[in-house]
Image (cartoon, rainbow, N blue to C red):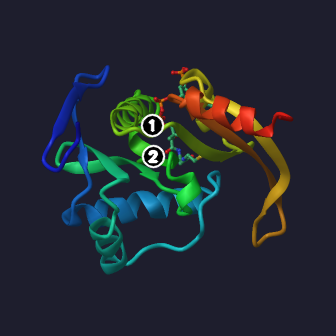
Amino acid sequence: MLVSGDVLAFALKSGTQVALRRARADDAHDLIEIQRQVVEENVANVDDHIDTVEDCRGRIASTDPGDLWMVAEANGHVVGTLRLMSPGPSFLKHIRNLFIDIHEDWRGQGLGTALISAGTEWATANGVEMLALSVLDSNPRAHQLYQRLRFTVTGQTPSLVKRPNGTYSDDTQMILQLCRDTSMREVEKRKDEPS
Ligand SMILES: CC(C)(COP(=O)(O)OP(=O)(O)OC[C@H]1O[C@@H](n2cnc3c(N)ncnc32)[C@H](O)[C@@H]1OP(=O)(O)O)[C@@H](O)C(=O)NCCC(=O)NCCS
């Protein structure tokens, strides 16, 4: 699912048709507008850097085939984005870090739910075992979304984020366990047992 060219379609409660598909180079302008909104809003744990069009196109083009950059398109514009990105090290290859942003005019209509549900389906089909994310405690809408989708809290870091104006935000780490190779975990346990 969601190999290049695949499109998933659904209707919002308002009746507006939305398409979920992989990001393309010509999405850059819309993606930068969403990034600008989220940076200015200051509720998410994102860097305050805003991409140039070239930066954004480069990031889309260099997305690893084992990762997912999905967008929601409505009325000819990208109105939401979800990225599931490998953390990097080889021993974390079974995990994807989740990043989601919805255009401010399109929130509260189920788009976040739809993007994460489609991303979870892609991840499961592609052998990803766990989704991981971190969310600021000053972001109740995101907390509500993740809790409803059964993400569980694995840790909390007080004052992780310090803004240029000197204010701090606490951060919560969450995971969604998709599957687990329990046979391998048993092998590890047996190795630790005294012989
Ligand atoms: C967080 C975000 C991705 C959610 O997307 P969305 O499309 O609004 O999500 P949904 O409509 O599917 O669900 C939103 C939920 O938040 C709830 N909600 C809305 N405002 C809320 C508030 N002020 N406090 C608590 N919950 C709130 C909604 O009721 C809904 O939950 P419910 O369906 O259980 O009632 C979106 O708001 C966003 O992009 N925010 C800015 C960027 C961001 O915070 N990204 C995540 C960083 S971790």
Question: In the image, residue 129 lies at what x, y percent?
Answer: 50, 36
Identify the residue position indicated by label 2 in the image: 104
Task: Report, in whole angstroms, how far the alpha carbon at label 1 lies from the one at label 2.
Answer: 6 Å
Q: Establish if 150 lies above or below 169.
A: above
Question: Total of numbered circles in the picture?
Answer: 2
| Residue in the picture at 65% in, 34% down | 187
Q: Amino acid at mark 1?
A: Arg
Front one among 134 and 81 = 134
Residue 145 shows up from this direction: no
| Residue in the picture at 20% in, 33% down | 8
Residue 169, numbered label: none
**Mark 2 sits near ligand 1, with its Cβ under 8 Å away:** yes
**Mark 1 sits near ligand 1, with its Cβ under 8 Å away:** yes
Identify the residue position indicated by label 1 in the image: 107
- Mark 1 near mark 2, Cβ–Cβ under 8 Å? yes
| Residue in the picture at 41% in, 27% down | 110
Tell me the quadrant of ligand 1. Answer: top right
Residue 194 shows up from this direction: yes
Mark 2: secondary structure: helix
Task: Answer left or right for 166 relative to 175.
Answer: right
Front one among 90 and 75 = 90
Location of residue 24 by image quarter:
bottom left
Q: Establish if 154 lies above or below 109.
A: below
Q: Amino acid at mark 2?
A: Glu
Task: Answer left or right for 192 relative to 183.
Answer: right
Question: In the image, residue 50 lies at what x, y percent?
Answer: 48, 72
Mark 1: secondary structure: loop
Question: In the image, residue 22 lies at what x, y percent?
Answer: 25, 50
Callout 2 crowding tier (Cα within 10 Å): few <14, some 14–19, many ≥20: few
Callout 1 crowding tier (Cα within 10 Å): few <14, some 14–19, many ≥20: some
Question: In the image, residue 178 lies at what x, y percent?
Answer: 50, 29
